[in-house]
Amino acid sequence: MNAYDPIQRIYVRPPHTEAFEQWKAYGWHTEPDPQAAADEHAGFVEALTAAVPDVVVGTAPVPGDPDAIYAYDPTLVTEAGVIPLRPGKEGRRDEVAVVAAELRAAGCTILPGLEAPATAEGGDMFFLDDRTLLAGLSYRTNEAAIEQLRPALAEQGVEIVTFDLSHFHGPGECLHLMSFISPLDADLAVVYLPMMPVRLVHLLEARGIAMVEVPEEEFLSLGPNVLALEPRRAITVDANPITRSRMEAAGVEVQTYPGNHICLNGDGGPTCLTRPLARA
């Protein structure tokens, strides 16, 4: 499993109108327009359906949780099965059981999940390659979670490499590892360099992974949050023309979609909105 091979199966979760009533408590920027959000998400799913053979749509609501639209965070998908996580954001913890049940119903193997005091969110983890999981230690993901994950992944021959993330705006706002890096291919990633841990920069350089740099003005508009549909083919929100042109100059075919209502308002891009279940 890695983060750039062609996606064969992917999981998404449409928004629920009732959950938007709690938008302010969950840190969304403005009151969402439920119909506009639903329409925008439907358009995003349509774009995915054109590129991915199997799109699994989860419909079970998580009452009072607008962040449940961000399907990437409640689980970690491995070659052996799905590991339910335990979000650091307490209001998102009910998502785990709902997502695990939907993925089990979709035929996925569900492995033992994290237990307290561990906390972890999927946005802090991605597979750099089939044998290396990168993980950010943050306000959402702690060392206890990494220690619980290590033996399960070691059985699969996977090493976990961790990095301390920055304070940024503090625990009240979400900074995930994937807030500033997304793989585009085995040898290419899009990054916002000012937020990158130095050890992570060195690791990419040592492995011959080139970096497409996101400019400062496109960091908060989710410039680094890019979903690789296959090597050098990606989908991203349409708010970042400089990043798009730089990816294209690196040989990446870039598809964009409107993300004002489901992405920019809630600070979650295409990686956050999806959980790839199989790549080949």
Image (cartoon, rainbow, N blue to C red):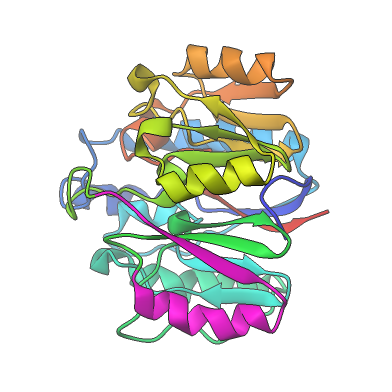
Q: x and y percent of residue 194 in the render?
A: 36, 32
**Can the viewer see residue 171 in this picture?**
yes
Which residue in the rendered view is the most extreme toward the right? Answer: 280
Tell whether position 11 is magenta: no
Quadrant housing residue 146: bottom left
Where is residue 150 shown, x and y percent of the image? Answer: 54, 80
x and y percentages locating residue 11 in the rendered image = 62, 55
Relative horizontal placement of residue 27, taking residue 264 as reference (left or right) = left
The residue lying at 52 percent from left, 59 percent from top is: 59
In the image, residue 96 sits, relative to residue 53, either above or below, namely below
Residue at 53 percent of width and 64 percent of height: 161
Rendering coords of residue 275 (x, y %):
59, 55
Number of callouts = 0
- Tell me which residue sits at (59%, 62%) in the image: 133
Q: In the shown orientation, is residue 194 left or right of residue 152?
A: left
- Residue 56 can be seen in this image: no
Q: Compared with residue 54, is residue 158 higher up or lower down, i.e. above or below? A: below
Query: Which residue shows up at 43% across the image and 31% down it?
Result: 192
Region of the chain picked out in magenta, as a range: 142-166
Of the 4 image quadrants, the one containing the N terminus is: bottom right
Magenta-drawn stretch contains 153: yes
From the viewer's perspective, tell me whether residue 65 is left or right of residue 1.
Answer: left
